[in-house]
Amino acid sequence: MKNINKSDDLKIKKTKTIKEDYLIELLDILYEKQILKKKWRKFKKVLKNILDADNIYIDIYPSNKHLKLFSKSKNISISSIDNIKIIKQNEKITLVLLLDLLNEKFQIVIENPKTLTKSDLILLKKIQTILRLHVKDEKDRREILEHLYIDPLTGLYNRYFLNTVIPIEIEKVKRYKQNLGIIFIDIDNFKEINDKYGHLIGDKVLSMIGKLIRKSIRKTDIPIRVGGDEILIILPFTSKEQAIFIATKLKNLIEKNKFKFDDTEISLTISSGVSEISRDMSFLDVIEKVDKALLKAKKEGKNRIVIV
């Protein structure tokens, strides 16, 4: 621990502030390997209690280039303690625990811990060591990737996957002159379903919609839950005409399906925006274009498809 930056900016204290019960609970979760399964939320909660942090999430990067980008920005300082990066911007501190597991670079990002003691840093180093010991084979790596990329409610990919994969797919379009179709779906009147039947039924509706979409599209297609009831489907090697066909198929399938929950039966419709990604479009261009198509479908009366 001799290489700790002791500048006033980092405000690293010498006093021990970690509660013993929190520490024991956290290490138990790690040793039981539960962080790779269903206890990630509990792990985050306990670690947040220890560090009094604003937010904690797990992330993945192919390299540490993002740290170099940080270093070029103004008012940002970066210091290192082994594989722990301490990034300070103005009054905000971000801790990044770097983990090189089975040739995949993961990181646990801890945003704005209110206190940062030497004991806290020792604990974070223990976490890194335990994770390295546990992640021994491809199955473990797949479990981490599944947690990173899959939305647990719908079984679709999540927004993080969107931000990671879409730029790559767009690059393929530019380099190999491939077709890439895109469908943006929104469940009509979903707020009213939540208000009338409750969020539990609303979650079941999302889960069933996710299952229906997964079963109805091709294995090469990429369905992503962007947030709430919005779902983006990326269609590699697909023209606009083919994307319209798939969007129409999904629209008709959901409209004909009866969603039953005990004594409750709900009929649903969806609105969709459909487009094809061209070689001169950026990531933001793609999202903006198809989002405008979806908004137009909603304004024109819902339960319809708008092509741009």
Image (cartoon, rainbow, N blue to C red):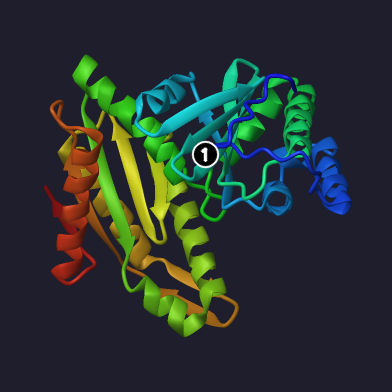
Q: Based on the displayed image, in which of its 4 quarters is residue 34 positioned? A: top right
| Residue at the front extreme of this rendering | 8
Please count the marks in the image.
1
| Amino acid type assigned to the residue bearing label 1 in the image | Tyr
| Rendering coords of residue 266 (x, y %) | 44, 76
| Rendering coords of residue 64 (x, y %) | 49, 20
Residue at 48% x, 66% y is 205
In the rendered image, the vertical position of residue 184 relative to residue 303, given as above or below: above
Residue at 21% x, 28% y is 179
| Rendering coords of residue 67 (x, y %) | 46, 24
Quarter in which the N terminus is drawn: top right
Is residue 232 left or right of 65 when viewed as pictured? left
At numbered mark 1, what does the secondary structure look like: helix, strand or loop?
helix
Look at mark 1 in the image and give the residue it sits on: 149
Is 4 or 27 nearer to us in this picture?
A: 4
Residue at 41% x, 55% y is 227
Residue 106 appears in the rendering? yes
Residue 246 appears in the rendering? no
In the rendered image, the vertical position of residue 202 relative to residue 116, given as above or below: below
Q: Based on the displayed image, in which of its 4 quarters is residue 3 positioned? A: top right
Is 218 or 227 nearer to us in this picture?
A: 227
Is 78 or 154 nearer to us in this picture?
A: 78
Residue at 79% x, 48% y is 17
